[in-house]
Amino acid sequence: MTAPWEPDTDGPEQEPEVESDAESAEPEAKQQEPDVAELEDRWRRALADLDNLRKRHARELERVRAEERASVTAAWLPLIDNLELALEHAEADPRSVLDGVRAIREQAVNLLAQLGYPRRDEVGVPFDPNQHEVVNVVETPDADPGTVIRVLRPGYGDADKQLRPVAVAVSRKPG
């Protein structure tokens, strides 16, 4: 018995089989070809899935927008109904019509607040360029400079989400 590192002397000497680089690369290339085709197929399927997802998302977004428009529009219907009632009673006592119109305005202001746009018409607060729009500057010794002394048009919403800013008159020092 011979050691594994010694050559076998019992028979004719045979050279160990050594594959050439060309022979060994050929089966590897054949094995890779199906992998490349499979990857291309996966890639195309992923692109198709992405395109379908985009289309589905666009349809869903449009559906949600339509539902929101319908919901907001439906919320305004009671106001329209009340305005029509006020117009029907316009020939009645002017004081009751005026009270009805005030109630309708309050209903509209409450609806805007429910939709996330509360009414802003505070007087005596410091001027905030994120919430206020200066329409007039008035010299007055009674208020600190930069204080809102009069609201000319109310605003709706908060500083980060507003429909329109509050139109105000702001004080300044006389002189």
Image: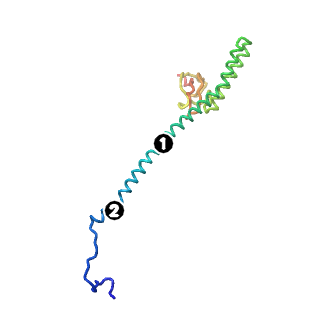
Q: Position of residue 43 (x, y in %)?
A: 41, 49
Residue at 52% across, 37% down: 59
Q: Position of residue 129 (x, y in %)?
A: 53, 30
| Count of numbered circles on the image | 2
Residue 40 vs 30, above or below: the answer is: above
Secondary structure beneath dot 2 equals helix
Residue 163 lies, with reference to residue 9, above or below; the image says above
Whole-number angstrom distance, CA of label 1 to CA of label 2: 36 Å
Q: Which mark is residue 123?
A: none
Q: Where does the image place residue 76, in percent across and percent down from the top left?
A: 64, 26
Check if mark 1's residue and mark 2's residue have beta carbons within 8 Å: no
How crowded pointer 2 is (Cα within 10 Å; few <14, some 14-19, many 20+) is rated as few
Q: Is residue 155 above or below residue 38?
A: above
Of helix, strand and loop, which one carries label 1? helix
Q: How is the image coloured?
A: rainbow
Residue position marked by numbered label 1 in the rendering: 52
Residue at image point 70% right, 13% down: 90
Q: Amino acid at mark 1?
A: Asn
Q: Is residue 174 left or right of residue 90?
A: left
Report whether 3 appears left or right of 99: left
Image quarter hosting the N terminus: bottom left
- Judge whether 9 appears above or below 68 on screen: below
Write down the residue under mark 2: 28
Q: Residues within 10 Å of mark 1 (few under 14, many from 20)?
A: few
From the viewer's side, name the closer residue of 136 and 162. Answer: 162
Which circle's residue, 1 or 2, is located before the other in the chain? 2
Report the residue that reaches farthest toward the front: 11
Residue at the spot x=37%, y=54% of the render?
36
